[in-house]
Amino acid sequence: MSALLSYIRVDSPIHRLNGATKLIIFLVWSLTGMISLDARVLVIMLITGITAFRISRIKFRDIAFVFTFISMFLLLNFITIYLFSPEEGVQIYGTRHVLFSISQRYTVTLEQLFYELTVTLKYYTVVPVALLFVLTTDPSEFASSLNRLGISYKVSYAVALALRYIPDIQTEFKNISHAQQARGIDLSRKAKPWTRLKNMLAILMPLIFSSLDRITVIANAMELRNFGKKKKRTWYSARPFGRNDAGALIFVLLLSAAVIIFTFYDGTRHYNPFL
Amino acid sequence: MGNIEKASASDNIAVKFKDFSFRYNSQKEPTLKNISLTINKGEKVLVIGPSGSGKSTFGHCINGLAPHSYKGEVTGTLEVMGKEASELGIFGASEYVGTVLQDSDCQFIGLTAGEDIAFAMENECVETGTMRQRVLAAAISVDMDKFLASNPFQLSGGQKQRVSLAGVMVNEVDILLFDEPLANLDPATGKYAIELIDDLQKQSGKTVIIIEHRLEDALHRGADRVILFDDGRIVADLPPSELLAGSLLEKHGIREPLFISALKMAGCGVRAEDNLQNIASLSIEAHKEKLLGWAGRGTGRTKQAAEQDLLEVRDLAFKYKSGTRAIKDISFSVKKGEMLAVIGKNGAGKSTLSKLICGMERPDSGSIIFEGRDITRDTIKERSLRIGFAMQNPNHMICKTMIMDEVSLGLKARKIADDIIKDRVEETLRICGLYPFRNWPVAALSYGQKKRVTIASILVLEPKMLILDEPTAGQDHKHYTEIMEFLKELNERSGITIMMITHDMHLAIEYTNRAIVLSDGIKIADDTVAAILSNEEAINSANLKKTSLYDLAIRLELEPELLIQRFIEDEGVKFHL
């Protein structure tokens, strides 16, 4: 059973990078992607991201569900922007090429389409890198990276444990929901959405209780083996910071600098093809 | 002189309780009452007692979880390796005491075996390079050095045990404390775990304290002393053989070893001089004649089930998406009104089989026939009209806070009229002995009663067959008997067919006529329980364990099946009286 969004253990250059490197790259990348609204550089970033994804040897089917989910969300975003601000593109680019008109308020312009596609593109440039970060970072190594970046090891470990138990809780949820379905509580798509939601909520109680049980046991097991005794701790799975890490970091920082310079070269965040 | 002697005597003490009592803050009464006990260095002590007897709390006091994590009030004194326990705290105690918890997967903290072994060292700020060396050394000592990079979930039960042992041994502790090490293990792995602990103790001379309620399995390699707890007090502190010869076990709800039951059935007087601690140590000569006479008087008859098939599984095969073959061409049938067991080691495909029957997974090929109708294509909900399924832990099934609501949940989902629901729920509660509690909140019930509530909430849907996953896992003898007698009565009175997934051989012997044995997704045996427990090949490949009855028969030079069958007959008589 493949779990949603959890570490996938394969060997690739991306997996071998230090967790801290990947965290920094992820942060820099997202920030850059958020700042720029220049479609040209966003396309370059997207291509780079997809290439990194290929290198990681993660299969598309492992993320197909999440990808579809994100795409649905972005589609919703696309529509919402249009509903609330149909003339946004016209304001930004200063020209108005009307394609067709729906009503007095809602006219579809080339500018609006371009603007919204750019916004969507911007999200898509972040998606492969965010997924890569989650899927290629061993939770314990991630904790050690957070700790290295100055975050308390207790917090780091808590984050790692949470990541690690996501698949377990998913399995547990599936088992409990099966047992409930076997006594006639319908959770399938055949049930009405409202009934289905109500039935899902009913399952949450046993799920929460079983998770709480688990947490007590884990907490005790950790404490019995000295977790929290000292102010610091070391990490078995810590990866040394290697030449590849330096290389990857320099590459991303340079790319990001280039992207920002290129974007703001003409004084705005936008690329205007209509001039 | 006197002083030196005194000093060396106290030097020899690992754990010393004196007038020690402990009361959890959440409880009115103390859980441990006036305990005085000394455990010497290098001793191997077995601590037994029914649930709620205080044996786990006893362990928690030694490793410091009580009162530092489980808050409570302490009176009297407790010294661990000569240090006052209240001053040590959990971290202080962990320098002397290594605790191995139940083999639940929760115990593994690290993501790989190596990381898990390293966990205590990480917290001690051992430098990464040194840590890797020490992990490797510890792994070699338990023969797990090839598996350092493995995910704990991919390891077998026995390998997990070895990793947890290595994880507490890296810190060079003096006392090893095992908290119900056998609870979730299949019989063969449990036996292996006990051998591992024993070998380790013999090599290292460490003090070993084992808290367990499975007495027979825990005594497989003997112990210096057995301490019996009940109601917060120590009621016996005896060498195993003396305890087994007396009547204290029965009085305090601990199951005696099967071979001792057999000796008693045969009318042999059991005495401490007979070395009763396990079947290998037993002096059998004096009892041979009586045993042979007893075993020979069996009728050799098994109770026949009705001939009508209720469920038929034909060439069922199933593969998980990840590619693991879980079930390979399994065929069998279940007769109406039967009570049978599906047994096999962890991961043999038992749970997958029950999921396929209930419709939670779809088979790749093969078919499932129920009362002559093909139900292979039916949904879970459609099958739930015929087949009920109860999970191992009742807390994972109960959704409502009130008993009435919980039991009526399935009927309400079927949109049945309220007055009919009320009648059916009350009727079911009566059958399950829960009628007096009908207006109680679920939280006020004991574990065994909760189990009944979950079974009641399935029975109310009037299925013809009930599948139970490990109905008695982790239960002491009293609760085990309570749950199983209830199921037996249900089976006899209402004729419901019951299929239990289990690795408890006692359960199979006492309560079922027939068992299906799975190993690596293949059905390797389908026979009477007596025949299976005499079939060495089936025992080995399914990770079952030869029961002491089997060994007893071998020592008597008898056909094992004959003796086991005779035993089951007598058991049956006992339960029906």
Image (tube, coloured by chain):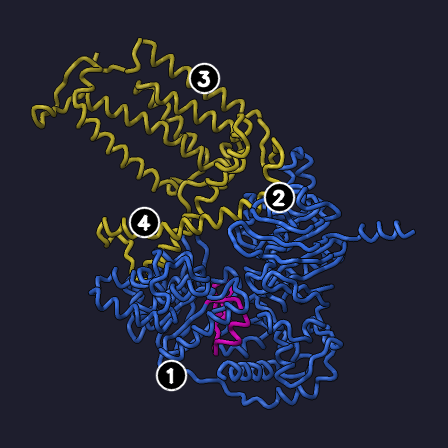
- Among the chains pictured, the one given yellow colouring is A
Whether tag 2 and tag 4 are in contact, CB under 8 A, the answer is no
A28 shown above or below B141: above
Question: In the current view of this chain or complex, which residue is farthest to the right?
Answer: B1
- Indicate which label's residue lies in the foreground, 4 or 3: 4
- Residue under numbered circle 4: A201
- Indicate which label's residue lies in the foreground, 4 or 1: 4
Residue occupying image coordinates x 64% and y 51%: B75
For label 1, the crowd category at 10 Å Cα-Cα, with few meaning under 14, some 14 to 19 and many 20 or more, is few
- Among the chains pictured, the one given blue colouring is B
For label 4, the crowd category at 10 Å Cα-Cα, with few meaning under 14, some 14 to 19 and many 20 or more, is few
Whether tag 2 and tag 3 are in contact, CB under 8 A, the answer is no
In space, the residues marked 3 and 1 are separated at their CA atoms by: 79 Å
Question: Are labels 4 and 3 assigned to the same chain?
Answer: yes
N-terminal of the pair, mark 4 or mark 3, is: 4
- Residue under numbered circle 2: A225
- Indicate which label's residue lies in the foreground, 2 or 1: 2
Residue occupying image coordinates x 44% and y 27%: A26
Name the secondary structure under disc 4: helix
Q: Amino acid at mark 3?
A: Leu
Q: Chain of mark 4?
A: A
A11 shown above or below A93: below
